[in-house]
């Protein structure tokens, strides 16, 4: 009996050491990717996003009221610059555009911009256009297999409600204190990554908000990268691109190292040490 107990203890210790090595190696890879800076995919993606205006709260509400499922919204000419055309017969989304003029006090003074009022302008959602595909953000690839079911079970064991929704776009996932929403129809590898990211938010950030949004998103995505890496998926530049989209850097990652390691380790244990009935 003592030999069996010692064997089990050694087996658990070996698993723990192996998980720790995987976590450390993955974090080193992610830190190196952040050190290299923006990938070409992220550069193109940011250039595309620069074409889309950031709308005021009022205009955002106007857009939502007229087209709740809108994701990427732009004017007629902006869509043309992006290689897309508004489909014939599509109805524009009305917003308020400022009317700005200039006043000159004297020939020697600078021209002062003045807001004279607002006019109605029209924008169109991506779904109202066709043409050249937009640049896609990097995504995780591979086949998580039974690990996806194990991950969902791990989330439910923690008392977190998991739901799938088509109404959270353009977000892929949302974490809101005891509930995770995931967009329907994601490829399984991407669904796995998004689930880990939101699970990490639940474990790390909802007992009381910690740090800036940059820190929170860096921590959650670093955990997703580590777990995906350990499960044999191919994160590519997806995680480093995501972190840099929120202005995260190698230094941000290293400052949160212990929290990331502990959370990734906990999620990996939940998945590996609690196999689902269908896979056992």
Image (cartoon, rainbow, N blue to C red):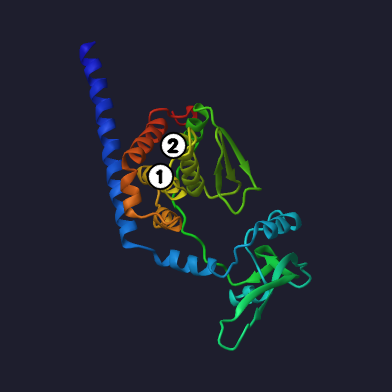
Residue 119 found in image quarter: bottom right
Q: On screen, 239 above or below 256? A: below
Position of the C terminus by quadrant: top left
**Alpha carbon separation for disc pair 2 and 1:** 8 Å
Q: Which residue is mark 1?
A: 219
Residue 239 location in percent, x, y?
41, 53
Residue found at x 44% / y 45%: 216
Q: Residues within 10 Å of mark 1 (few under 14, many from 20)?
A: many
Q: Is residue 85 visible?
A: no
Residue 64 location in percent, x, y?
71, 55
Q: On screen, 154 above or below 184? A: above
Report the side of 192 relative to 258 (left or right).
right
Res 204 label: 2
Res 96 label: none
**For this rendering, which residue is in front, 33 or 109?**
109
Mark 2, secondary structure of its residue: helix
Residue found at x 42% / y 33%: 271
**For this rendering, which residue is in front, 110 or 205?**
110
Q: Is residue 268 visible?
A: yes
How many numbered marks, from 0 up? 2
Residue found at x 50% / y 27%: 157
Residue found at x 72% / y 66%: 96
Mark 1, secondary structure of its residue: helix
**For this rendering, which residue is in front, 244 or 33?**
244
Report the side of 274 relative to 5 (left or right).
right
Residue 26 location in percent, x, y?
31, 47
Which residue is outermost to the top? 1
Q: Earlier in the sequence, mark 2 or mark 1?
A: 2
Which residue is outermost to the bottom? 107
Position of the N terminus by quadrant: top left
CB under 8 Å between discs 2 and 1: yes
Q: On screen, 236 above or below 159? A: below
């Amino acid at each position: 009996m003592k030999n069996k107990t010692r064997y089990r203890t050694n087996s658990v210790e070996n698993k723990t050491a192996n998980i720790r090595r995987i976590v450390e190696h993955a974090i080193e890879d992610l830190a190196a990717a952040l050190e290299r800076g923006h990938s070409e995919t992220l550069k193109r993606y940011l250039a595309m996003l620069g074409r889309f205006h950031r709308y005021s709260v009022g205009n955002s509400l106007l857009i939502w009221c007229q087209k709740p499922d809108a994701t990427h919204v732009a004017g007629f000419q902006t869509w043309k610059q992006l290689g897309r055309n508004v489909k014939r017969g599509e109805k524009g989304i009305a917003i308020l555009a400022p009317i700005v003029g200039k006043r000159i006090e004297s020939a020697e003074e600078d021209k002062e911009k003045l807001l004279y009022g607002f006019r109605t302008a029209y924008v169109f959602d991506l779904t109202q256009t066709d043409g050249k595909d937009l640049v896609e953000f990097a995504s995780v690839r591979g086949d998580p297999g039974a690990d996806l079911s194990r991950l969902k079970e791990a989330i439910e064991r923690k008392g977190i409600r998991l739901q799938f929704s088509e109404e959270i776009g353009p977000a892929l996932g949302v974490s809101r204190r005891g509930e995770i929403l995931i967009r329907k129809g994601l490829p399984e590898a991407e669904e796995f990554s998004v689930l880990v990211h939101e699970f990490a938010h639940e474990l790390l950030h909802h007992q009381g908000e910690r740090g800036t949004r940059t820190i929170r998103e860096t921590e959650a995505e670093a955990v997703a990268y580590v777990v995906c890496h350990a499960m044999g998926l191919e994160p590519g530049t997806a995680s480093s691109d995501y972190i840099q989209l929120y202005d995260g850097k190698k230094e941000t990652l290293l400052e949160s190292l212990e929290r990331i390691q502990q959370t990734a380790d906990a999620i990996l244990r939940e998945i590996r040490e609690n196999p689902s009935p269908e896979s056992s």
